[in-house]
Image (cartoon, grey):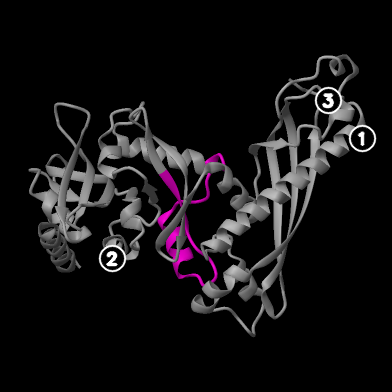
Amino acid sequence: MRKVLCVFSVILLLLAGCLPKSYIETLGIISAVGYDLTEGERIRGTLVMFQFDPAETSTSQVVTAEAETSKGVRFATGRLTSHELVSGQVRLEIFENELAERGMMKYMDTLQRDATISDMGYLATSEVPTERLLKSKNDEDQPNTGDYIQELIKKSIKNESIPSALLTTFMHDVYDVGKDPILPLLSLENDKTVINGVSLFQDDRLVQTVSQDLMFYIMLMTHEFEHGQFQIQLEDEALKKYHKKESIETPAEGPLHVSVHELSTKPKIRPTKGEPTKQSLSLEMEGRLLEITQDIDLKNKNAVKTLEKEMEKKVTEHLNETLKILKENAIDPVGFGAKYNAHNRSNRVTRENWREQIQDLQVKFDVSFTLLRYGISE
């Protein structure tokens, strides 16, 4: 028994001696990467990395290099620092729009093959060079701009302002038949990174960018809001008959805006059997009135019912306008095609024929809106 223990101890000692040692002070831990397309059709990569200094808590550095491939960028940037670059902490990858328009999968080969890169990282596109984004200085309380952008995206997803931007979600939507990906669109305002809308994809190619307002209506079709908020403009005269008596002589000027918070929704898509281009979508919405810009008598139940009907009407209009844009670009971020396949075993749509059928898609929207609490107006 004693001999066995001695042999076991020797084996453990030998194995321990074979493990490579990496002192943290010698490592450059990459946390964010941005890719741009150069005039010479090469890729310019910008890497944000942490460098640990015994004399300081931690420091960060931003390096930029050009190459023909994303892997080549890693090799090129490695020559610009004395630290050994490691990618185990990459949590953010940003692609300039011009590059994303060519298809992102060929540039994401490193992301898929490198087992050290987390599949829970975030993806985004940018309407300005990513080098400018990652070198901007307004990073608030974050150690660098890469971390600031990551927290900005994470917060926006949590607040239900944008859909999931995880690498896993993007990859699933690329490979799923009948659904296209969506990613947040970044920009700069006063040298500070902001989310300026979203990018819509056809497979892995960016084909259209849209505002945050339009994104809301795409999310209404796909997402069950739990604590959302939104503002909508109604017809100026929609509630004129319900103005309070004291405000009739001095009516409020300007359009009628309504703000709702604590919004909860339940969308349900119902495909027609055997007809992929004919579908219906019912949408139940509930929310609390936060503000209304006309002095409406909200103690009058008929006024509240009229307000709900007007909101249903306007939301339906915006949904139809949004659908029109999706059809014009032959994209399906909602997943109507995937939903049809989930309910039909025959006459299923394929990646090729669904792209052709999207332009003929007809969706009947049925919106119901309920105001849960009201009485405050400004």
Reply above or below: 64 against 98: above
Q: Dot 1: few (<14), some (14–19), or many (≥20) neighbours within 10 Å?
A: few
Query: What residue is pinned by disc 1?
Result: 302
Where residue 108 sits, quadrant-wise, is bottom left
The kind of residue on which mark 1 rests is: Asn
| Residue 41 badge | none
- Image position, residue 125 (x, y; %): 38, 49
- Residue 25 relative to residue 204: left or right: left
Where residue 186 sits, quadrant-wise, is top left
Kindly check if marks 2 and 3 are in contact, taking CB atoms under 8 A apart as contact: no
- Image position, residue 17 (x, y; %): 10, 57
> Which residue range is magenta in the image?
158-185
Kindly check if marks 3 and 1 are in contact, taking CB atoms under 8 A apart as contact: no
Residue that appears at 44% across and 53% down? 166
| Residue 113 badge | 2
251, 376: nearer the viewer: 251
Q: Mark 3 or mark 1: name the one nearer the start of the chain.
A: 3
The kind of residue on which mark 3 rests is: Ile
- Image position, residue 22 (x, y; %): 14, 49
Label 2 to label 3, Cα distance in Å? 60 Å
Residue that appears at 80% across and 37% down? 371
Q: Mark 2 or mark 3: name the one nearer the start of the chain.
A: 2
